[in-house]
Image: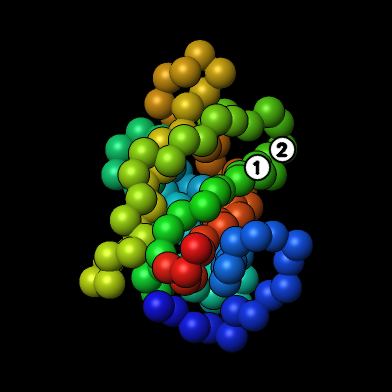
Amino acid sequence: MASRRFKQFRLSLETAVVDLYMNVSIGASGAPTLSSLAQNQGIASMIRNSAGNYTITLSDPYARLMGMTKTSIAAGAPSAPLMNVVSSSVSNAASPQIVLQMRNDASVAADPANGESLLIHIELKNSSVQ
């Protein structure tokens, strides 16, 4: 599995937990742009598939996805406050990916607003040891 100097200590029964952080700016028509490489280590890319649907490609495969959180930084109220993980194939060695679906308050697929920044925290397990 991946080993990018991730040797974090945490009070957890899970072994080899890895935290990845993303800082993504949303442009016109929902197009995502990763900020500087230093802030997105471990993330290869993020693309928009359709309204509110995004695919995050990781740089390395992991045993499993443990969780994700999203924080929006916007001038006003965020347009797509809800985020669901649609599918996760993080153990795929060729292309480890996470597919997200974002929805507005009416539960309709929606992109974040133009100019909005997303801070995403991805928690992964880096070991198959239980």
- The residue under the point 28% across, 65% down is 92
Q: Quadrant of residue 8?
A: bottom right
Q: On the picture, is 117 further left or further right than 50?
A: right
Residue indicated by mark 2: 75
Q: Residue at x 73, y 73 (%)?
A: 9
x then y, percent, for residue 27: 48, 48
Q: Which of 36 and 129 is in front in this view?
A: 129
Q: Position of residue 71 (x, y in %)?
A: 66, 44
Residue at the far right in the pictured view: 11
Relative to residue 68, is residue 125 depicted above or below?
A: below
Is residue 109 visible from the viewing direction of this image?
A: yes
SS at circle 1? strand
The residue carrying pointer 2 sits among few (fewer than 14), some (14 to 19) or many (20 or more) residues within 10 Å by Cα, namely: few
Q: Mark 1 points at which residue?
A: 72
Number of the front mark, 1 or 2? 1
Label 2 element class:
loop
Answer yes or no: is residue 46 visible: no
User: Which quadrant: the N terminus?
Assistant: bottom left
Identify which residue, 26 or 82, lies in the foreground.
Answer: 82
